[in-house]
Every structure is written in structure tokens, then in C-alpha cells.
Amino acid sequence: MLDLRLLDPHHDLLAEAVWEMCVTEASAWSGPQACNDTAGWIAATVPGTAAAALAEAGRFDPAAPQPLHDRDVWYRTRLAPRASGAHRLVSGGLATICEAWLDGAPILISDDMFATHEIALDLDGPAELLLCFRALTPHLARKGPRARWRTQLADHAGLRLVRTTLLGRMPGWCPSIHAVGTWRPLALVPETVVEVEDVRLDSALEEDGTGRLTVSLRLAERPAGGQAEIVCAGWRAPLDPAGDGVWRAEMLLPGIEAWWPHTHGTPHLHEVTLDLGDRTLALGRTGFRRLTVDRGPDGDGFGLLVNGVPVFCRGAVWTNADLLRLPCDADDYRPWLALAREAGMNMLRIGGTMAPEGPAFFDLCDELGLLVWQDLPFANFDYPVKDEGFVEAVARETRDLMGLAGAAPSLAVVCGGSEMYQQGAMTGVGEDRWRGPLTTEILPATVAEVRPDAVYVENSPSGGALPFSPNAGIAHYYGVGAYRRPLEDARRANVRFAAECLAFSNVPEADDLPGAAAPGHDPAWKGGVPRDRGVGWDFEDVRDHYVQVLYGVDPRDLRYGDPQAYLDHGRAAVAEVMDATFAEWRRPGSSCRGALVWTFQDLAPGAGWGVVDHAGRPKSAWYALKRAFRPLKVSVTDEGTNGLALHLANDTGEARPVRVEIACLREGRLAVASGATDLTLAAHDARTLAATDLIGAFFDVTHAYRFGPPSHDTVHVRLADPDTDATLDEAFHFPLGRGRIAPGAALSVQLRDLGDAGFALDLETDRVAQSVAIRDDALRPEDNWFHLAPGRVKTVRLLPAGDATPGGHVVALGGTPVFYSAA
């Protein structure tokens, strides 16, 4: 098939096409002959969605979306006058039941949103291209094999028989914005410009550091002189005919620079080109890396080794860059993926409930050093695997989806889907009914054809005595979170790998949210709070539970008397839970080898699951994860009568000399015990120290023995550069609880102009200031919702945003704001 990325975009005759769109009642027009030119056609963008076109015309409100799956949606355009001769119409995806005509002659029928299409056309001058996306609702009523279980996730059981996304069809999870239209690129290419197609790049890294590259492709004509070469990283290999029009080359690249996730090294990429003697064609780029799975000593674990090095995978579950448009361009992806990298994430998971992303997504993840866990688009349903047509369709669609990633080294895990095993098991049916050939035979065989270098996982979750047991295989862990378990449950559950976890209604920083004047009460506010169907609680209740547990205050009293304090305690609580849980999971003795937070971004305004809000602004949870995910990290865990454990991690590829300091503070300011040690952390190393090893004698750091009244309320641990004394990381422990921190910290705030680098705030305090928030009217702080220790200046950059002028305030939880301004 033709890869549009390898073609000059100027050759696409649809690149400058003017599209119109019209919405009609279902089956109002049978075909082109019935179309009405006065039926309210509006301008449309391709690729794009019907909802986006309607919104642009002022006829669709994303905050109160109207149904589209019960309507027919028509697109049309006139082809350019130069459209003559042999052409190919190439489609990246049509949502979902689509018919197409060229000058009234049928050319396509598609019923799979995820399928790609390539149609040979013989054109003779100007012509009209017409597409109709038929109403989906009638198709949801069609008969199929009886389901062995039902799910509450989606709004219609018939979706199990239709290959379309569940986005927009999950009440309580996301707005009901239906995916309809030409959601992926549509191109018309003259046959004369096609030089190469069916390109496949396979890259691998051998244990000795040698890269192996295999290239296969089809050429429109034999190379001049019969000779062609593949070129990569300065190495060359001849391209030889392999039969049936296929050409093939294989090369070894000794000492090639390997691709790493950015937390553990440099994501080196290498261009691959085809040298035809008289011209050179770019075939794309790839990286060389080796993936293996560590199942642990008991065989029940799951951990990724990249190039032989264990990698703690941390990140979040991706939702979508824009639910209204479903975009697939680099410009749409880049701001989101840059935030993921800035937060120290090294993995994003595209869940089975979402929509697969375009090639630009993988290109950017390659560049940024982000691993991708790709669920195939199956979720929760009992799919009709005995239907031969269904099996053929999903195998073809899976090949297409794997092709979107090309040779991307970022693609690490391919999973058979989300929560089918869990859904079946939770309804009480046996394993022989919820675990079957779709995920154990059909999908893995297809994935192995296209991306044999990726790790395949049957389903998420899977692997335990029950598929949702977190102590084996892949977990969806919500013990801490939806099930309101104590923070200690993160260890007790013996989590091995959490493909999703820690879902909360995360409060954005913005004050312009719907219903923000009455949070937790106004219906507009509640509309932005996610919930599961059929339960008597929502995820704001979950957040409020941890506010009460951590701070010993009733969130209802806060909400009644001081709505701002209610929101701030919620922001602080979520940040603290994230920090404590990942401190547990990243410690050297943990069974956990990776965890992805549910979710990365919100799909609509409000206090959604996302750690980034719908407009791309980080929330308190994002800042907490940014600290928890640092490659060079110190964290602490309370080991009771075993004292306080200090956990050090150096994920980077270089050894790092560090100094570790500890101070136990009374009333948050007076050191009653302290100590320090210097050491060197080897590359990709982690170790645990006891607090008493630094102090040099017994001291009840965790207040576990209780020999008399408590001597301190705060423990501050600092990781520093021994040469410059610069703080590399820090951690806090509150042995009496977060609600017992002495109030009244006096903050000092100084704004500094850094010239071209923007601005920074220098912060000081006379005692520990808890959950310090920076609220700037124009700029985003580099760090936020952190604890501030006395005795040192903490500098926080305000990231540049054009010519914006800083101004705002700094406030500790429960404290008095301190204002600053550039004026």
C-alpha cells in the first residue's frame, strides 16, 4: 500500500480541495441522484469530523452535543481539472459506515472506522467525489451471536458488532460527541508519481550492540542500471529482487547509537534512504532498541527491559488531543507530548476505549523518547470471534493500525484490548468464556507479522488468579483511588504492573470552570466530574475521601464554608497521593515495574480524570508526577519500627555522585536530629538507605516507638550535588500526619527578571510550608504544589509565554497569599 508520508504533498490532488458537508435524516437520500444542492451545505475540513465542521458553522455545541449517529452525513468536493489518468484514492480512516461515489458511480463501501483503503481510479478530467456516512444507529440493532456478558461502559450493546471507537459513547466518561466523518487523511495521487510502496522497515538491536535493519519494498520500475542501495547511519546495503515485485535489503550496523526512553538515555534516530543512483528517496527513520520482558522470579511479574536495562515505566493513559476534531497532525500532538516528557513520563498508553492515533504521534514519541503501549481498539465487550467475516476484518484492521507506527522504536507494547477479561470475569462467567482466540491467537499472530519486535499482552488487565487481581501480570489498580483503600494498600496489593491506576477527579488550576462558584454542588460543576455508570458515587467523592484521610478535615465543612479551601485541599490531596504511591512503587524492593495514571488529559472542561486539563494546562497531579518521575530521585517510605527508608534512583546512563541529607524538624523549623552521607549512584542504579545510617544513632524518625511525646513533625531529605550544593531532589515525611503541620509559615517571594530566559521566583520560608501553590495570571510555573523547607532559597522559573508579564501570588495550604508583580 502507498504510504502518504513518502510522497510530496504537492502531488495530492485533494490537498487544496474545497469540501462541503450536509447533514440529513437517516436514509433521506439514497445516493448522488437524490442529493439536494439547497439542503444547507456548509464548509468542511478534511481530514476532520462532522462535529468539528458543524461547530465551526455555529451549529454544534460541544458542551451540549447533539447526536450524530442517527443522521446521515454527506461530504462532497470537485476534483481539480488536471485530474486525469490513473490515480489512487487513499484513505486513512472513515467513521464509520461509509459509501463513496465518483461522478455518481460507486467506488467504496466501508464499515470499519479503523480500516485503511486504497482504490484505483481512472479519471478523465473534473469530477465530483461524494461520500456518505450513514447513520450508525440502525446498524446497532443488527443481529449477531449472543453476548456471554454485558457491559455498563457503553451506551449501546450493539457497538460490539460495529468497528468504531467508544469515544463519545461512554456516559460519565466523556461528552457524547460522536465520531463521524473523514477523521483520517484522504488523498488522491496520480499513479505516475508513485515510485515506491509497500515499504517495511524492521530494526533490531543485538546484544552486542549491533543494529540489524531489514528493508522490503516495491518499486514502480527497476532502478537505472539495475542497482539500488539502502543507506542508514553511513552504512550501505544492496537492494536485491526477492520475487513478486518485492525488493529486499538487510544490513548490520556495528556500534550503532541505540534508542532509549528519554529517562534512561538518548532516543537516537536514524534516517533510512533509498539510493537509486540518479536520485535518493527518503523511506523514513527508525531507532535500534531491544525489548524483553522480565517475569520475575515467580513468573507472575511484568517488567520491560530496554536494551537489557530494567525500565520502570511511568506515565499515563492517553485520551485524545481534541475530542471534537480527533486530529492527527504533529502540531496538534506536540504540545501534549511535550508536557508528558517534561513531567518525566516515559510511557503513554492508548487504551482500547480510545481512538488509535496517526503516524505523527509515533514520530513525536520516537523523537521525545516516549514508549507507547498500544491497546488494539477492543474493550469490555464479548466480540463475535466465531464470525469469519469479523475475524478477517479485525486481522486486516490490525495490520493497518500497526502500519501507522511504521518502524517506530517507541511502539513497545501491543495489547489485545481493554477489560474484556475483567468484564467477563466480574459477571461470574468462567475463564473458558472470557479468554478466547481473539486475544490469544488472532491478534497476536497478526501483530507478530507486522511488528515482531513489540511485546504482546493479551488483555489489560490480565495474568492473575482473576484477571483483575493486581498481584500478577497486568493490573488496573484502584485500591488507592476508587476503592478508597489506605495508602499502604499500594504495597499490600503487590502490584506488578499497573496499566492504569490512581483515578481522581483532578481539579484544574483555572477559575473559569463551569459551576466553579459552587464546586461539588452546581450541576454544571458536577457535569465535569467523571463517574461510573450504575454507582452511587463519583470520583469527586474519591478525592474528598483522601482529603479527610490526609488532613483530618471534613471536606463538606470546607465546601460549605470556604469553597477555595475545599478546592485547594483537593488539589493538595491528589498530589500527595500520587507522590506517596509512586514512592512506594519506585523503591528498589517493590514488586511494581511500571504504572500509568488514568488519564493524561481531560476531554472537556471540568474536574476530570486528566492530570492536564482540556486546554493543556497542568494540574496539581501533573506537578506531583513530575517530581515523582524524576530520573534522579530520592523518596521516603515509613517502615514503622524499621524506621524511615530513603530510596535513591539513578535511571540515567551516567554515574552520579550525590550527597544525601536528612533533618528532623520540630514545629517545621528546628532541627532536632540530622545527618548526611556522600555516595556515587552508578548508571541505572537504585538503592535504599536507613535514616539512622545518616543520623548515626537511634532516633525515632517515624515516631513508631513513641517513647514520650513526639520530638518532631517533619522529616526533610535532600539530594544534592556534592560539588555545587545544588538541590537535585527532595522528599518530605510527616510522622504525625499532614494535618499536624504547624501553621503560619511566613513566605518570602522575590520576582527576578532572567532576560531571554523569562522570569523566576525566589521563595523562602521560616518553617515548613505545605503544598505551596503559585498562581500566575499569565505564566506557568516550572514547579507547583510542592513543600517548602526552611533555610534555603527555592527558585521556580516562570516559563515564557510570548511577551506575557508575570503577576500573581504564592500561597501555602491554609496560609495567606503573598502577591508579586512585574509592575
Image (cartoon, rainbow, N blue to C red):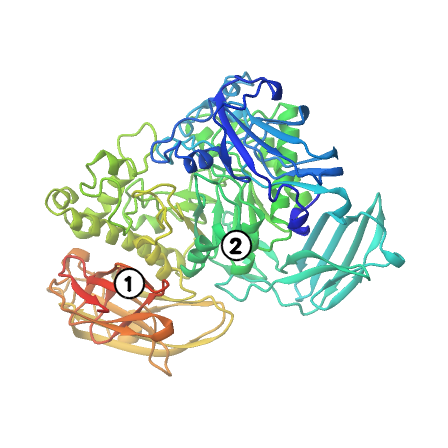
Residue depicted at 84% across the width and 43% down the height: 244
Tag 2: amino acid: Leu
Counting from the top left corner in percent of width and height, residue 676 is at 30, 78
Look at mark 1 in the image and give the residue it sits on. 642
Residue situated in front as seen by the camera: 338 or 819: 819
Counting from the top left corner in percent of width and height, residue 281 is at 73, 57
| Label 2 vs 1, first from the N-terminus | 2
Residue depicted at 46% across the width and 54% down the height: 337
Mark 1 element type:
helix
Rendered image quadrant of residue 68? top left
Q: Is residue 696 visible?
A: no
Counting from the top left corner in percent of width and height, residue 88 is at 71, 38
Q: Residue furthest bottom?
A: 723
Look at mark 2 in the image and give the residue it sits on. 371
Is residue 474 positioned above or below 424 on the image?
below
Horizontal side of residue 169 vs 790, given as left or right: right
Residue situated in front as seen by the camera: 14 or 443: 14
Rendered image quadrant of residue 389? top right
Q: Tell us which disc is closer to us: 2 or 1.
A: 2
Distance, label 2 to label 1, CA atoms, is 37 Å
Tag 1: amino acid: Asn
Q: Is residue 498 visible?
A: yes
Residue depicted at 61% across the width and 32% down the height: 394
Rendered image quadrant of residue 207? bottom right
For the N terminus, which image quadrant? top right
Q: Residues within 10 Å of mark 1 (few under 14, many from 20)?
A: some
Horizontal side of residue 663 vs 442, given as left or right: left
Is residue 357 positioned above or below 26 on the image?
below
Horizontal side of residue 688 vs 607, given as left or right: right
Horizontal side of residue 273 vs 484, given as left or right: right
